[in-house]
Image (cartoon, grey):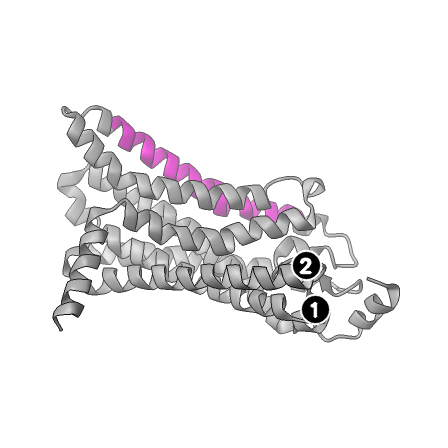
Amino acid sequence: MSRRGENQTLALPGFIILGFSDSPRLLRLFFFAFFSAMYAATLAGNLLIVALAALDPALRTPMYFFLGSLSSVELAYTLVIVPKMLVGFLALTLDGGAISFVGCAAQMYFFIALGASECFLLAAMAYDRYIAICHPLHYPVIMSRQACVRLLVGSCAGGFLLSLGLTGLVFQLPFCHSRLVNHVFCDIPAVLKLACTDTYINELVIFAVAVMVLIVPLSLVFVSYSHIVATILRMNTAAGRRKTFSTCASHLIVVSLFYGAAIFMYMRPRSTHSPQQDKMISLFYAVITPMVNPMIYSLRNKEVKSAVMRALGKKTDS
């Protein structure tokens, strides 16, 4: 952008999210159609999981309580990012990506809060599988309804409190450079680049929080599944081992997709970041992962498929 254009953005009360504004108009229209379809599939898939977990009596177990909670978090997670991104695809000028200072802070806050909550929730789901497989006799007592609610509330409370600190850490900085956020939403690395002061301490704190949010829960997942694998290997029959592992396979795939993209985005050196690469990674964990997660759970889970068939059967009968 020209110097004149940059000077004009300094007078704005907020920011401008560039997104893919430098791409040809036809390509952006294709992006709009493609990601709109994916977003519709994301909403439909996650709403289906939430409805089944809440309404089907056969799915009122701790595992499906957490699965429904995960889908609820992902619904909110995509609502924070995707609608504004889709509007940006259709914008004819940079003003189409305009967002207020408060709006940018709110978007960052809810994105971090919900993303961190999902990290903790995935660890809680691994703990649930560990208790179910390694301590089946104590499972109903340990994973009572109250215990599940406490794990869910703790996961969300931890995510929202950490996000409050991080968002405050970023938005207390002075922004005296260009207000052009070279990203698809108000993400921390993209907004930090606009600060006109040294951000080393901020980046250090953000890295420490990333370790707390990503590495610690992922370590708990690994510990849980190491015990699960050891228990499965001690089972007498191959059929029993296959059946037990199949209940965990979907969760492992989701964990790999979510944590893999997030760690690559937030824990690699800043010198290796490029705006275009960061945008594509963000699209992966903000759009693609929430869309495929319900598919992974439904396609690999006989109970979910049976619940869908029961729901369709009731609708047909009525």
Q: Do the residues labelled 2 and 1 touch (CB within 8 Å)?
A: yes
Residue 43 disc label? none
Say if 242 sits above or below 147 in the image.
above
* Image side of residue 60 versus residue 163, left or right: left
* Image side of residue 3 versus residue 126, left or right: right
Determine the residue located farthest toward the right in the rendered image: 3
Amino acid type shown at disc 2: Val
Q: In which quarter of the image is the N terminus?
A: bottom right
| Residue at (55, 53) in percent of width and height | 283
| Residue at (43, 49) in percent of width and height | 119
Q: Give the range drawn in magenta.
A: 203-230
| Residue at (46, 62) in percent of width and height | 37
Residue 281 % position (x, y)? 57, 48
Would residue 60 be seen by someone viewing this image from the given angle? Answer: no
- The residue at which mark 1 appears reads as 15
Say if 158 sits above or below 317 in the image.
above
* Image side of residue 253 versus residue 195, left or right: left
| Residue at (33, 30) in percent of width and height | 226
Would residue 224 be seen by someone viewing this image from the given angle? Answer: yes
Q: Which of these two is toward me, 76 or 97?
A: 97
- The residue at which mark 2 appears reads as 191
Q: Which of these two is toward me, 14 or 245?
A: 245
Residue 220 % position (x, y)? 39, 39
**Secondary structure beneath label 2:** helix
Residue 8 % position (x, y)? 82, 72
Question: Is residue 38 on the magenta stretch?
Answer: no
Q: Earlier in the sequence, mark 2 or mark 1?
A: 1
Amino acid type shown at disc 1: Phe
Question: Is residue 207 on the magenta stretch?
Answer: yes
Magenta portion: prevailing SS class? helix
The crowd level at tag 2 (other Cα within 10 Å; few <14, some 14-19, many 20+) is many
